[in-house]
């Protein structure tokens, strides 16, 4: 191995060439989608068990990611390493499953046992390979061919274009299955309760204050009593309610505007009418956007009948990791 220092310009050129080579391969693959891909989607959609994804080497790494993407988007999936399958893990594969086996050459020796097992027990087999004449392709019920495109590395051997294409077709399968099943944001959150994704998909109902914690007063409430409610609840505001519906809101600004006569007024005389609100079931990220855009710190949450069911403060969103 010898080294030659590339200039910065040459380095960027090499990197750009990799991206163009892989992008061209994806364009080529997109243009060849057809009956085999539809059959693969139908087999996975109709299965009663799980999609068993298998491969070795770089194909194994990509397969692991494909299985994770499918599982997180509503398609039960599990990665089984082909070598481990030969040493007992074939017991994880049942007649209710579908196998998705990945090999660029289609002749990877370690895949023999899982291929044979799927044929013996009539388990549907989907292949992802570049070699239409390979053992894997000829044994499979459905073969999804990778494009005949060069690897993007300088020597044309390191898995680059082929792994990108494999990952992309896995994503395409996952998204197609999502949409055929009507998989939505709420379903996605079930599989992503933690981290940034979970936070962004949290609904106001999960964060809002409710019941006795709500700072609510009636229209006839005297302002000295309303002030006690505002102080005790700790939100710096109070909601004016009539028959359970929000009729207005009292904020620090309303208190300052009425300072001269405040202690002799009722809540109805001080409150601002038609305040901004948020609906139950709304994403907390949308509520935060509303608060930031209007420079307010809290929103009352209303149900479909306009009844007050909660209060969301901007600090609740911050604590939940929503930004």
Image (cartoon, helix red, strand yellow):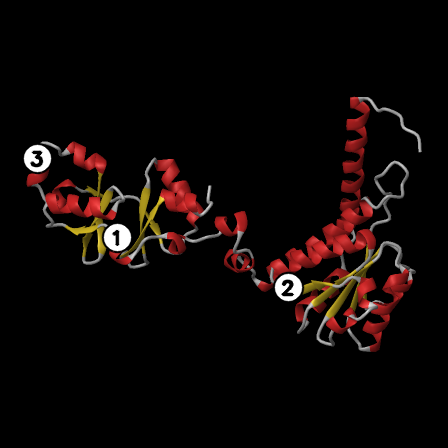
The residue drawn where x is 65% and y is 65% is 76
Mark 2 and mark 3 lie on one chain; the one further toward the N terminus is 2
Res. 93 in view: no
The residue drawn where x is 46% and y is 52% is 202
Which image quadrant is residue 251 in?
Answer: top left
Alpha carbon separation for disc pair 2 and 1:
41 Å
Name the mark on residue 261: 3
Q: Which residue is mark 2?
A: 75
In the depicted structure, whether residue 187 falls above or below residue 266? below
The residue drawn where x is 11% and y is 49% is 221
Q: Are marks 2 and 1 in contact (CB under 8 Å)?
A: no
In the depicted structure, whether residue 63 falls above or below residue 123? above
In the depicted structure, whether residue 181 falls above or below residue 24? below
Q: Are marks 1 and 3 in contact (CB under 8 Å)?
A: no
Mark 3 lies on a secondary structure that is loop
Mark 1 and mark 3 lie on one chain; the one further toward the N terminus is 1
Most foreground residue, 201 or 133: 201
Q: Which residue is mark 1?
A: 214
Residue 185, position as x, y percentages in the image: 52, 55
Residue 291, position as x, y percentages in the image: 36, 40
Alpha carbon separation for disc pair 2 and 3:
64 Å
Residue 195, position as x, y percentages in the image: 54, 49
Q: Is residue 113 left or right of residue 323?
A: right
Crowd class of label 1 (few under 14; some 14 to 19; many from 20; radius 10 Å) = many
Alpha carbon separation for disc pair 1 and 3:
26 Å
Name the mark on residue 260: none
Which image quadrant is residue 124 in?
Answer: bottom right
Q: Nearer the viewer, mark 1 or mark 3?
A: 1
């Amino acid at each position: 191995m010898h080294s030659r220092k590339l200039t910065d310009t040459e380095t960027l050129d090499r990197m750009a060439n990799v991206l163009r080579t892989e992008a061209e391969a994806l364009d080529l693959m997109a243009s060849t989608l057809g009956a085999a891909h539809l059959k693969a989607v139908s087999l996975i959609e109709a299965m009663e068990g799980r999609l068993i994804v298998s491969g070795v080497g770089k194909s194994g790494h990509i397969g692991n990611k494909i299985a994770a993407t499918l599982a997180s988007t509503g398609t039960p999936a599990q990665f089984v390493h082909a070598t481990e399958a030969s040493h007992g893990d074939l017991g994880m594969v049942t007649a209710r499953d579908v196998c998705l086996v990945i090999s660029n050459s289609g002749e990877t020796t370690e895949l023999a046992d899982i291929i044979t097992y799927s044929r013996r027990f009539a388990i549907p087999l989907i292949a992802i390979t570049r070699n239409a004449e390979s053992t894997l392709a000829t044994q499979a019920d459905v073969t999804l061919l990778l494009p005949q495109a060069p690897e993007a590395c300088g020597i044309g051997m390191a898995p680059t274009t082929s792994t990108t294409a494999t990952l992309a077709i896995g994503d395409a399968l996952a998204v197609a299955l999502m949409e055929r099943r009507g998989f939505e944001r709420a379903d996605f959150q079930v599989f992503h309760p933690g981290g940034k994704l979970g936070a962004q998909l949290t609904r106001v109902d999960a964060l809002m204050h409710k019941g006795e914690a709500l700072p609510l007063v009636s229209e006839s409430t005297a302002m000295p009593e309303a002030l006690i409610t505002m102080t005790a609840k700790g939100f710096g505001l109070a909601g004016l309610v009539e028959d359970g519906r929000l009729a207005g809101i009292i904020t620090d600004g309303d208190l300052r505007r009425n300072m001269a006569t405040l202690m002799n007024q009722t809540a109805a005389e001080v409150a601002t009418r038609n305040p901004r609100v948020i609906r139950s079931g709304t994403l907390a990220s949308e509520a935060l956007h509303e608060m930031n855009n209007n420079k307010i710190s809290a929103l009352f949450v209303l149900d479909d009948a306009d009844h007050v069911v909660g209060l969301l403060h901007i600090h609740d969103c911050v604590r939940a990791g929503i930004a």
